Image (cartoon, rainbow, N blue to C red):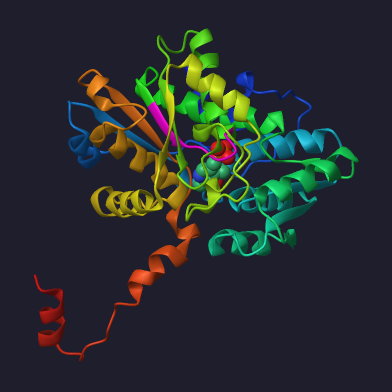
Amino acid sequence: MQATNAKLRQGRGVIEHYCEYLPVSDSTPIISLGEGDTPLLFCPQLSKRVGHGCEVFVKNEGVNPTGSFKDRGMTVAVSKALERGATALICASTGNTSASAAAYAARAGISCAVVLPAGKIASGKLLQAFAYGAKIVAIDGNFDDALRIVRELGERGDFAIVNSINPDRIAGQKTAAFEIVDALGNAPDFHLLPVGNAGNITAYWAGYRAYNAHQRSTKLPVMLGFQAAGAAPIFYNRIVETPETIASAIRIGNPASWKQARAAIAESHGAIDIVSDEEILAAQKWLAQHEGILAEPASAAAIAGLFKCRNSNEAAYSFQKIPDGSGIVCTITGHGLKDPDIISQRMKELEPVAATVTDVRRVIGL
Ligand SMILES: *Cc1c(COP(=O)(O)O)cnc(C)c1O
């Protein structure tokens, strides 16, 4: 009976689907855009490339309402903020948090302020914040500066903070782990994802553990997190003052959930590793051209990480050690359309030809 009810609640947002696992009650007003219930896609080419009889799946969070996993946490954070009587939200953002906060604030009929590092936001994400009507402030500083300011404004009580330092965000993001276990019938052997502020790795691990405690799975995955080489505070175990990477969503030098990420890695016998911008871009292109999935660069870090584990003896986690036939899940955290500038470089190569069948056929070359 419970399973039937859960099925009926699918597609109606993560709060309705997983209310018994979330900090909500009958008096919580549910602000949802139908987030979650995203595809867990088996990837035949990726599985082949990894080899060892491994099965690789991608959890495609890019198809959430605002194009990233942030919506899972935002529905809970905004619903709870409204329940507590908030009239304004605030967040610091590398882009996707602001897109999501702005959309859910619009849905809730409350205002939203976003504090962004000037010139550092992917254009699609900034476009979303404008379109949903957020109050946007660009600062001369990085994400870590923005979060410091937001924390201070939030402490004064004028705004509800919807960054991942808000536990309601983490609670909502756990639902991605629930969906994976529901789809596979158990937890995967390995879970790979990009790490920025480390809220998501914290949430996945908490989600896998909660489901395991409720006997919904018989095992827990090994958690493997990937940071960009120029923004890898957890890997190097020190704050990075000026983080640099093309993957703007993980351009973070002082992660808010640093300790929790370390715990997730230690408890799951996993690892944190780094990938270069070149590896990230190559993985983004490979996934689009071999599996038809366009991920934003930060998301491609997980795929780059998978390739590194598979190919390199220097990897923090070597796939030589994993048993044949392991089940692997990689989270694609956000949609590639959010960051068009990276790909549009390649479009400049397009030269028009004469409008004749002969010319078109010559250019196609097939
Ligand atoms: C926010 C975000 C990340 C990083 O997640 P954290 O919870 O900050 O570690 C990775 N990829 C995308 C697309 C994001 O929006």
Q: Is residue 296 at least partly visible in the picture?
A: no
Query: Residue 314 occupies which quadrant of the picture?
Result: top left
Find the magenta span and give its range: 191-198
Residue at 60% x, 38% y is 197
Count of picture labels = 0
Please state the horizontal and vertical placement of residue 221, each as a whole percent of the image: 41, 19
**Quadrant of the displayed image that contains ligand 1:** top right
Horizontally, residue 329 falls left or right of residue 106, namely: left
Q: Nearer the viewer, residue 151 or 130?
A: 151
| Magenta region includes residue 196 | yes
Quadrant of the snapshot with the C terminus: bottom left
Residue under the image location 55 percent in, 37 percent down: 233
Would residue 326 be seen by someone viewing this image from the given angle?
A: yes
Q: Is residue 226 above or below residue 145?
A: above
**Front position in the image: 21 or 284:** 284
Q: Would residue 291 appear left or right of 170 to someone viewing this image?
A: left
Examine the structure image and report whether residue 54 is included in the region drawn in magenta.
Answer: no
From this view, report whether residue 45 is shown above or below residue 257: below
**Residue farthest to the bottom, as pictured:** 354
Q: Position of residue 235 (x, y in %)?
A: 49, 33
Residue 291 point in image, percent of width and height: 27, 47
Give the x, y percent position of residue 92. Answer: 70, 48
